[in-house]
Image (cartoon, rainbow, N blue to C red):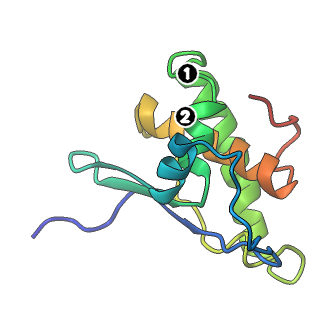
Amino acid sequence: MKNLLYTAILIIVIISCNTSKSTTPNTTKSEKELATKSNDTVTIANEELEYEIIIIEPGFNFWLASTARQRGFYSQQFLENRNRLYVIEWNQRVLQPQRFNPRLYELQIDYQNGIDYGYEVNYMLYNYFIYFQLTYNQRLGPFLPRI
């Protein structure tokens, strides 16, 4: 039986609160943006390492394609270092629902030191943290979120 324990599981479901929908069509959005927003689930899995990351976030795919730095811009070591800091802060906020919005911080992230998750996982996780901080005006570490 295959080991079903995933070393890194990230399921983020954030529901926008208090948003209003316009009854008039927004003609300033491009077709590409609308098509990208319709596919808001990103899944990265590796059966050999037995990890899976699932990011469900409206607008993240579009932001990743249009705003984030290209793959290879940051080194894997840079991404791993930042992800460690962000994950620690994220998990602390998950454990304090009376202090931090539990709708923003729903589940803990199992990101362990010493495991090589690869460049793609670190790239996606780092960019999600940046997107999250910019979108929800949060600060997860000592660094200003930068693109």
Q: Residue 84 versus residue 97: which sits nearer the camera?
A: 97
The vertical placement of 79 against 125, above or below, is above
For discs 1 and 2, the disc positioned in front in the rendered view: 2
**Residue in the picture at 53% in, 23% down:** 76
Count the numbered circles shown.
2
Q: Is residue 44 visible?
A: yes
* Residue 116 disc label: none
Q: Position of residue 110 (x, y in %)?
A: 52, 59
Q: Secondary structure at mark 1?
A: loop
Q: Position of residue 115 (x, y in %)?
A: 43, 40
Q: Position of residue 43 (x, y in %)?
A: 38, 53
Residue type (three-letter) at the residue carrying disc 2: Ala
**Residue in the picture at 77% in, 70% down:** 22
Instruction: Spot the residue most to the left.
Output: 1
Residue receiving disc 2: 65
Q: Position of residue 99 (x, y in %)?
A: 90, 77
The vertical placement of 98 against 65, above or below, is below
**Residue in the picture at 62% in, 47% down:** 128
Q: Secondary structure at mark 2?
A: helix
Q: Residue 14 versus residue 91: which sits nearer the camera?
A: 14
Residue receiving disc 1: 70
Q: Is residue 113 visible?
A: no
The vertical placement of 16 against 123, above or below, is below
